[in-house]
Amino acid sequence: MAETAELEAEILDTVASVLNLDRSRLTPELTTEQLGLDSLDLMKVTFAIERRFAVNLSSYGFQEVNSLQKLVHLVAGRLADKKRQV
């Protein structure tokens, strides 16, 4: 559980940094629509997260990631897959 909370915090920090948003206003429950994100914003966030966590998110469409929570779950799944491959 602590790992998930840390991952969530790191992802929210990344989103805030990439999009110049106030980190204190970000919660996992926020949707991309509520944040006013367009496909270019999502692409920037995706690339930043791929670099930060060394995971590949390209097989998922931006439409599938419609909330920050879904993004956290997606990254957690990719990191778990990566650990299993080692």
Image (spheres, grey):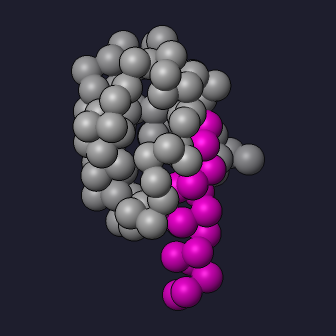
Rendered position, 56 above or below 82: above
In this orientation, does residue 56 appear? yes
Segment colored magenta? 69-86
Q: Of residues 64 and 76, which is closer to you in this image?
A: 64
Residue 36 in the image, given as x and y percentages of width and height = 40, 18
Query: Residue 42, relative to residue 20: is it above or below?
Result: below
Q: Is residue 47 above or below residue 40?
A: below
Q: Is residue 73 left or right of residue 71?
A: right
Q: What residue is at 60 percent from the left and 43 percent from the top?
A: 70
On the image, which quarter does residue 45 sit in? top left
For the image, the number of numbered tags is 0
Judging depth in this view, the residue of 17 and 2 nearest the camera is 17
Extreme bottom residue here? Answer: 86
Q: Is 49 covered by the magenta stretch?
A: no
Q: Residue 58 location, x and y as percent?
A: 38, 63
What type of secondary structure mainly makes up the magenta span? helix
Residue 8 visible here: no
Q: Residue at x 49, y 22 (%)?
A: 33
Instruction: Please indicate whether residue 84 sits to the left or right of residue 12 in the image.
Output: right
